[in-house]
Image: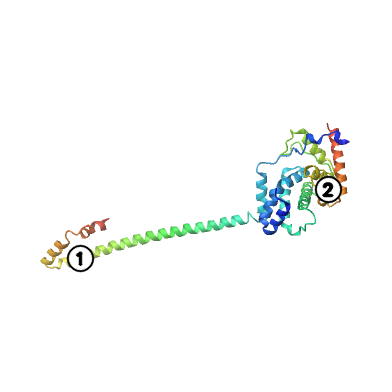
Amino acid sequence: MISDADIIRTMESSSEQGLKLLMWKYMQPVYWHIRRLVVSHDDAQDASQETFVRIFKSFGSFRGDCSLRSWIYRIATNEALRAIGRRRGGSVSLDDDSVMTIAADEHWVDTGDEVAVKLQNAILSLPKKQQLAFSLRYYDELSFEEMAKVADSTAGSMKACYHLAKEKIVKYIREHD
Amino acid sequence: MADKDFDFKRVGKRMPYVAPDGLWREMERNVLAEAGMVAVQKPKVTTLHRKHRFGRIVGLAAAVAAAAVLFWGTNAFWRQSQQVNLGDVDSAFGQLSNEDQNFLLEAYGDDVFLNNESDVIKM
């Protein structure tokens, strides 16, 4: 597995090769991270692509005061929130607590996997910050410190968000059984 | 604990979301194009190649046309000059004495190149 340090070094010597390496490692994690937040495949694809273009264009501003992974997920999260905002015709922040759900006619969703659909709907019912905390920890296995960098928060706050999210998910599933 | 109510291991990291075939390749292509690495460079290269290829075809066609014109012109000129030369030779031959004519006929009558020359011109 290629390391983030290798990606940074390559980006500095050859931006094209660096971007390719970065996409090779992060394309799928970024897409799925955004997809879990926005649900729509089209929006997820657009936001993912925009994420990598932004990473490429603003790589010079990456100072290394957080991990490359945190920086990438931060940009991806911003793009996901922007995509949700575009859908709603307004801006959306991590303080947003509106409930989302997977539509029955949503494209590129295996609605036959009922348990998986229920878990995602439970996650989508959470406020955005808790969604983010659960997703980053459960699916992407980020440390609470890395999560704090993504959400511009503290590790303690992210830990609390994660555990609260987990409890709410369990409650949601129990109520929708 | 709430975890006892729902076993996350039942689902694990499985999601109901599906990605279309070829998505990753398409996304990479789109990002590289947007970053000005593929879409900007490739067409330029292609355009240059096309221009070069078109130039080569035009040049080749012009060369073929020029060669055809040159061949046709040279051949026609050569035929004409051959006819003129042969007429001159006939008239010069007619002005020779009988002895000289007989000598030339004896000396060159069996010459393969001279006798076949008329055939070559006819072709």
Q: How is the image coloured?
A: rainbow
Chain under numbered label 2? A
Q: Circle 1 sits on which residue?
A: B89
Task: Report the front residue among A73 and A156.
Answer: A156
Indicate the amino acid at tag 2.
Answer: Phe
Q: CA distance from mark 2 to mark 1?
A: 111 Å
The quadrant the C terminus of chain A occupies is top right
Q: Which mark is residue A144?
A: 2
Is B79 situated left or right of A85 in this image?
A: left
Callout 1 amino acid: Val
Q: What is the chain letter for disc 1?
A: B
Residue B50 lies, with reference to residue B1, above or below; the image says below
The residue positioned 21% from the left and 60% from the top of the image is: B114
Label 2: state its secondary structure: helix
Q: Position of residue A145 (x, y in %)?
A: 83, 50
Could you say whether the residue bearing mark 1 is in a helix, strand or loop? Answer: helix
